[in-house]
Image (tube, rainbow, N blue to C red):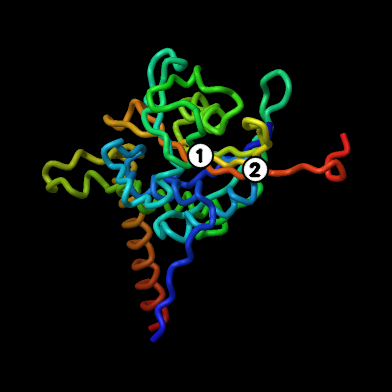
Amino acid sequence: MLTFELRKYVGGRWLLDSVFDDKTVAVAEAKTLMERNTSLPGVRVVAVAEEEAGSFREWTVFRQMIVDDEQALQRAFQLRYEPAPAPRKDRDAELPHAARPPRRRTHPDWLDYTGWGLCAAVALGAVVIGVVLVTRGS
Amino acid sequence: MVMEAPIREMRLTMRVLRYWRDIAGKRPFPRVSDLDARALGEDWQNCLLVKLRSPLERSFLAYIGSGLRLPGGPAEGIALAECSPETILARATSYVSRVLAQRVPVSMGGSSAQLSGIILYRSILAPLSEDGRTIDTILGAANYREVQFTEEEHPD
């Protein structure tokens, strides 16, 4: 037996609305439903064939949606009804300075001092060389 | 300015389905008490109400519109199981179980023998519920016309 199921898109999923044994009537009713219900995003008519051994085969014979792409419709539904997750904030930035946890160090303390010492030595050497060159020139 | 009248739906079953949708609103099912015979107008004469009982065979016709009554045919109160299969009432209520299973209005049509003739009929059954969950009554509507099949049209 072949029947035609009118399904409507509600709440992000397809719900069965009514069943007909006539394709023309089902499609006409689907169009009317869309016309009368402006908040309805989509309808479709699915042919359902009951085959032997109690199995069913179905295929869409009519489809009308305010957005042509069902995935876009789902995204629109999610934007409208499902709040997007709040942007992740830097938790430490909200704490007062004193309450912030100490930053994890990536190198040992002595390396700090050694670095500064090397810089000072290079700068001192440059000054000495500069003085020597100036005195020789004069 | 000329006001255009809304186009009247040609099919009885679709008019009744539209009325069912209107009284249901956003609920899954309307109540029996939501039904207003005046709002349905002449279509009410082609309507029926089935009060559901368990088992389903004990369900009975609580209302039969005059357009569906046959001379000497069943009256209100008759159980579905007692309806003669060769009547529009039996054909129009033969898929009550499907409405209960799918919980939505179902419309069926076809040809059938009635009394001494053949009829083409179209029908619809729509669920009603007092508590919004349990379907306790079915609103039905049907119309039919007798057809004459000639030997040329149906040689077999």
Query: Residue at the location (73% across, 43% down)?
Result: B148
| Distance (Cα) linking label 2 and label 1 | 19 Å
Tag 1, which secondary structure? strand
Query: Residue at the location (48% across, 30% down)?
Result: B99
Question: Which quarter of the figure has residue A136?
Answer: bottom left
> Mark 1 belongs to which amino acid?
Ile
* Residue sticking out furthest to the bottom: B1
Describe residue A16's horizontal placement relative to residue A129 as left or right: right
Query: Residue at the location (56% across, 22% down)?
Result: B84
- Residue denoted by label 2: B146
Question: Which quarter of the figure has residue B103?
Answer: top left
Q: Chain of mark 2?
A: B
* Residue sticking out furthest to the top: B55
Q: Residue B49, position in %: x, y? A: 39, 33
Same chain check for tags 2 and 1: yes
Query: Residue at the location (50% across, 28% down)?
Result: B73
Q: Earlier in the sequence, mark 2 or mark 1?
A: 1
Pick the quarter of the image with the C terminus of chain A.
bottom left
- Residue denoted by label 1: B124
> Mark 2 belongs to which amino acid?
Glu
Q: Residue B152, position in %: x, y? A: 87, 45
